[in-house]
Amino acid sequence: MRALITGHKGFVGRHVFPKLIEAGYEVHGTENLEHFLHSSLASSSWDVVIHLAANIVNVHDRGQIGMCAFDDLALDMKVFNWVERNPPRRALVVMSSCALDFPEDPYCIVKRTVEAFAACLHQHRVPVVILRPFSGYGGDQSTEYPFRAILESALRHEDPLVVWGGSQVRDWIHIEDLAGAIVHAIGHFPMGVPVPIGTGIGTDFFTLAKRIAQAIGYSPRRVANPALAHEFGWRTTITLEEGIRRALQDRCDHDSRVHLVPQMRMR
């Protein structure tokens, strides 16, 4: 069996490639789609095509780079047009995304269009599997992504430890599981229906950062050890909750006093 991976040197492709070999495939990859489409390989017969090629754009930059944010549409169109003319015998595996709930985000538009392309091929009897992976992560991921960025910050013992996303919850799936799901999809998952790929467990960014810091043995916090002061008879008496209440009361009292002071007029 022969398999082709577009974008085989990327984060996901690097992990899928050996798993396909383990599954008994003769695996080929391309990082230059134009070169591939004009080569003899383009007219070869394929059992499986896994489309992973994409332009990596930082999430913070997507709305700032203009039409470049939609470049993947042209890339995807070329792949899908080629597949329509040369359908694989077993499956075309297409990567969508879980991030489909922000219609103003160019990335969301691109991935929804990918699913529309895949549905069109499915209607024309091309075997298509559509995967919606959740937040993939791993040690060799780009620092453009939150997991690796937080990991590197913790390894540098940054204080404060900068956390992307704050209280937002994500389903974190390790790259080995994601790569395994892609290979498993061939011959097992339904065709033409988006299949969510994740753990089913949500973890917010703050908790993720704490677990990473704990694994490293780093505690980015400043907490006093009051044992010596206690030994000599001193202890705090005001809890944080009481301190907040007092601060609010002080603020209200201050505002009241300012309001009562008559305005001075210049003569």
Image (cartoon, grey):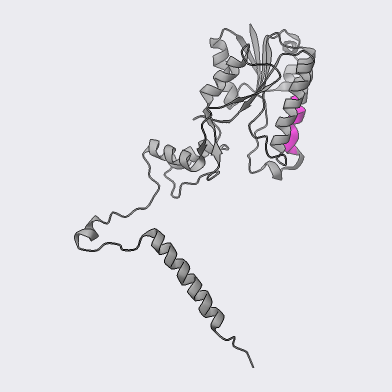
The answer to if 231 sits in the magenta stretch is: no
Residue 91 location in percent, x, y? 68, 13
Q: Is residue 74 magenta?
A: yes
Q: Kindly indicate the quadrant of the structure image that contains residue 92.
A: top right
Please name whichever residue, 8 or 164, is drawn nearer the observer in this view of the structure: 164
Magenta highlight: main SS: helix
178 over 247 or under it: above or below: above
Residue plotted at (60% across, 22% down): 13
Question: Residue 240's spot in the image, x, y percent?
Answer: 39, 59
Q: Is residue 106 visible?
A: yes
The part of the image, by quadrant, that contains residue 62 is: top right
Query: Is 221 left, or right, of 108 in this rendering?
Result: left
**Residue positioned 64% across, 12% down in the render:** 3
Is the N terminus in the top left, top right, bottom left or bottom right quadrant?
top right
In the rendered view of the protein, which quadrant contains the C terminus?
bottom right
Confirm whether residue 38 shows in the render: no
